[in-house]
Amino acid sequence: MANARYPTVPKGATGVLVLADGTVIFGRGFGASGEAVGELCFHTAMTGYQEIMTDPSFAGQIITFTFPHIGNVGTNPEDVEADTPWALGCVVREDVTAPSSFRNVEPFDQWLKAHGRIGLAGVDTRALTRRIRMAGAPDAVIAHDPEGKFDLKALHEKAKAWPGLEGMDLAVEVTGEQRDWTGGPWRLGFGYEPTETDEPSADDRPHVVAIDYGAKDNIFRNLVKAGAKVSVLPATATYEQIMALKPAGVFLSNGPGDPAATGEYAVPVIRRLIDDDMPIFGICLGHQLLGLAAGARTSKMHQGHRGANHPVKRLEDGVVEITSMNHGFAIDADSLPANVVQTHVSLFDGSNCGIAFTDKPVFGVQYHPEASPGPQDSFYLFKRFVEGLK
C-alpha cells in the first residue's frame, strides 16, 4: 500500500485499487479489463463467492474477500442468485487457481471476464479489511489493464467524485420484471426442481406476492419449499398492482442502496398494505423498509455486516442463530414505535436484526435465512410466514 501522489506502477502490476483518500493498492488484475467505482467492503464467508458476486444487494460495491482462496472451484450456472454478477468487482489475496470441482463449467477468471467484472489478486486483504473496520467502508475505483498502464490521478479523482451509497436508490436498477416463480430447491445431479407439496395442486397453496427490490433467487425457492405459490413484482409496483393479484401475503425482498431512498416510493405502498392487515414478511432491505413504514429511522453503518457466520440472538427464547448477512444500513431500534418490538439482535454489535408488529401479522429480519449458513437455523421464518397464510 502507498499514500504517495502518485506512486510509480511496480513491475508486474496489472491491477490497482485507488481509494478516495488517495491510497493506492497495486495487484494483479484478472477478469475483465477496465475500471469501476463504488463502495469498498469486505465479506468473511469462506465459500459461496459466486452466490455473493451475483447477489443484487452488492450493486455499487467492490468486495474484499477475507478468505484467501477465491475462485478455486470455478463457476457453474446453478450457484447463482441472479442472472449476472451485480458486484462491481472483487479483491482477493491469492491468484485464482485452476478449478478443482467436478461441478465447474467455467473458470472464475473467464466467468468474470464474460460478465464484465474486474478482479484484483495479490493484495494483503487482512490489512485492507482492518483498514475498513477502523475507518469505515471507503469509496474506491478498481481497475485492470493487462499492460499495467494507469492514470492514477484520474482514478483518484473518480473515486473522490463518487457520491456514495447514502441517499442512493439502487433497487430500481436491479429489480426484475413481473413473473410467476416456479423453481424449487436444488439437488445435486437434478438442479432446481419444482417442489412437491401435499396440496392437490399449486393453485391451492397460499399465494405470496414478492416485491423484488433486488431479490436473491434462493429466497423465492425457500418460499416455494415452505408451501407457497409465488408471484414476483418489480420494486416500483403500486398498491393496486399488488392487490390485483389477490395475495394471501406479501414478501419484501433484500436489495442494494439506501432504504430511505427506496422508501420514497416503497414505504407509502407498504403502509397501505399494513393498514389492510396484510401479512408481510421482509428480509434485509425489505426489513428496513418495514421499519421505515412503521415510523422508525434507518442509518448507514460504519462498516456493515457481510459474512456467513454472524451470531444473532432471538429474544423470545434466547436461541442463537448462525446467520448470513449483507447490509450496510440498519434500523435504529430506539426509534421503533410502541406497537413494533425488536425480536432479534446481533451478538457482534447489538444492532437490530428483527422486528415484529404487535397488532399486525407483520415481521422482518435483517439477516438472510435463505442462505443456509446454520445450515437450517432460520428456515422456520419461511414456514412461520407461509403457515400463517393457510
Image (cartoon, grey):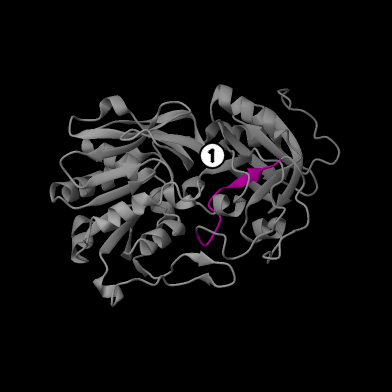
What residue occupies the far left of the structure in this picture? Answer: 276
Q: What residue is pinned by disc 1? A: 309
Q: Is residue 388 above or below residue 180?
A: above
Q: Using the rendered image of the protein, determine whether residue 78 is visible from the camera's viewpoint.
A: yes
Give coordinates of residue 144: x percent, y percent: 71, 46
Residue at left offset 63%, top offset 26%: 130
Residue at left offset 15%, top offset 41%: 359
The kind of residue tagged 1 is Asn
Q: Using the rendered image of the protein, determine whether residue 166 is visible from the camera's viewpoint.
A: no
* 41 and 281: which is toward the camera: 281
> Per the image, is 157 magenta?
no
What range of the chain is rendered magenta?
82-92
Q: Is residue 228 left or right of residue 321?
A: left
Q: Is residue 8 left or right of residue 229?
A: right
Residue at left offset 83%, top offset 35%: 10
Give coordinates of residue 213: x percent, y percent: 37, 52
Quarter occupied by the C terminus: bottom left
* 163 and 186: which is toward the camera: 186
Magenta: main secondary structure: loop
Q: Is residue 372 left or right of residue 230?
A: right
* 164 and 45: which is toward the camera: 45
Q: Secondary structure at mark 1?
A: strand
Residue at left offset 25%, top offset 50%: 280
Q: Is residue 270 above or below residue 10?
A: below
Give coordinates of residue 374: x percent, y percent: 50, 46
What residue occupies the far bottom of the structure in this picture? Answer: 200
Q: Quadrant of residue 216?
A: bottom left
Quarter occupied by the N terminus: top right
> Per the image, is 87 magenta?
yes
Q: Is residue 118 above or below residue 168?
A: below
